């Protein structure tokens, strides 16, 4: 007898779809016609944003990342991304806080020179003096609104000669997001149902249920965030955004 093996091309459910299906089956009784996956995704992203903000409050370095960018000859101003930016159809994380900057001024440089943060108020000469008079061995940068100003200015256009260290902001989740896309401590993932219940009941003006869900959430999140507070995260490089340059 010949055993016939039947294979299918059924698509594996994503991590986010699994969360939504589990929540629909075990926490809130509703079928897809009543509440679609997209609707549940909205509640999940609200919970995700809530946990991102909570995590940042106790340890913003959890969202540390760095970006490499191209130096522009004789240009001192580079603009931080303040919104999600699309490069080659791939969403990029935004930079919400700059911490340090490294720069190379020549092709022979093997390491980045760390630029120090300086306040405009502490400068003793006119800002334009520093564009080419500041020693390349002692670069500094200033921050004004969304822009970073680097002195002395680069004199060559070379990709990757600027490196920005800072705090990123995770992108919203989509239905096909996987575990690696959820930029939170794994322990917080277990609290998604409590937070989703809270947002769900709030949207339905179910006051008692909403308050109960929030109380349960607060108790559990406090336990987890105590461990996150002192956690050290190994930096992971992400694809460089196109920093907006001004002439």
Image (tube, rainbow, N blue to C red):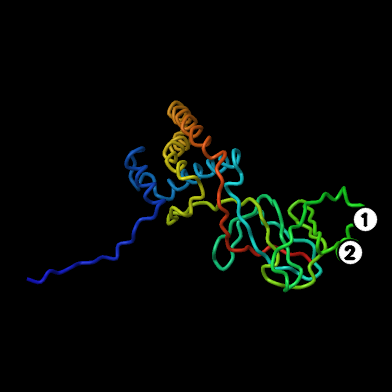
Q: Are marks 1 and 2 in contact (CB under 8 Å)?
A: yes
Q: Is residue 90 left or right of 31 when viewed as pictured?
A: right
Q: Is residue 181 left or right of 33 when viewed as pictured?
A: right
User: First in sequence: mark 1 or mark 2?
Assistant: 1
Q: Quadrant of residue 111?
A: bottom right
Identify which residue, 189 or 171, lies in the foreground: 189
Identify the image quadrant of the N terminus: bottom left
Residue 112 position (above or below residue 2): above
Instruction: Measuring from the top left, give residue 198's x and y in whole percent.
Output: 46, 35
Q: Circle 2 sits in a helix, a strand or a loop, which is it?
A: helix
The structure residue drawn at horizontal position 71% and vertical position 60%, both measured from the top left corner, is 102
Q: Quadrant of residue 151?
A: bottom right
Residue 195 position (above or below residue 114): above
Identify which residue, 207 or 165, lies in the foreground: 165
Q: Tell me the CA gap for discs 1 and 2.
A: 11 Å
Residue that badge 2 annotates = 133
The structure residue drawn at horizontal position 56% and vertical position 57%, both measured from the top left corner, is 236
The tag on residue 125 is 1
Instruction: Measuring from the top left, give residue 214's x and y in whole percent.
Output: 48, 30
Q: Circle 1 sits in a helix, a strand or a loop, which is it?
A: loop
Instruction: Measuring from the top left, give residue 19's x and y in whole percent.
Output: 39, 47
Label 2 neighbour load within 10 Å: few <14, some 14-19, many 20+? few
The structure residue drawn at horizontal position 83% and vertical position 49%, both measured from the top left corner, is 119
- Choose mark 1 or mark 2, whichever is in front: 2
């Amino acid at each position: 007898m010949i055993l016939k093996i039947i294979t299918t091309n059924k698509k594996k459910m994503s991590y986010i779809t699994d969360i939504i299906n589990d929540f629909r089956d075990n926490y809130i009784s509703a079928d897809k016609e009543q509440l679609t996956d997209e609707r549940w995704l909205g509640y999940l992203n609200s919970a995700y944003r809530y946990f991102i903000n909570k995590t940042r409050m106790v340890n913003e370095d959890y969202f540390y990342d760095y970006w490499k960018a191209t130096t522009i000859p004789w240009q001192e101003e580079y603009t931080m991304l303040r919104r999600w930016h699309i490069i080659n159809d791939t969403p990029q994380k935004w930079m919400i806080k700059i911490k340090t900057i490294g720069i190379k001024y020549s092709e022979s440089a093997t390491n980045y020179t760390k630029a120090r943060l300086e306040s405009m108020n502490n400068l003793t000469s006119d800002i334009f003096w520093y564009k080419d008079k500041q020693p390349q061995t002692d670069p500094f940068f200033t921050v004004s609104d969304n822009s970073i100003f680097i002195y002395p200015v680069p004199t060559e256009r070379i990709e990757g000669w600027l490196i920005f260290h800072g705090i990123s902001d995770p992108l919203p989740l989509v239905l096909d997001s996987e575990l690696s896309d959820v930029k939170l401590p794994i322990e917080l993932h277990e609290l998604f149902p409590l937070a989703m219940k809270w947002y769900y009941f709030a949207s339905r003006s179910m006051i008692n249920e909403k308050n109960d869900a929030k109380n349960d959430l607060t108790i559990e999140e406090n336990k987890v965030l105590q461990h996150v507070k002192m956690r050290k995260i190994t930096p992971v490089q992400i694809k460089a955004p196109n920093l907006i340059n001004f002439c």
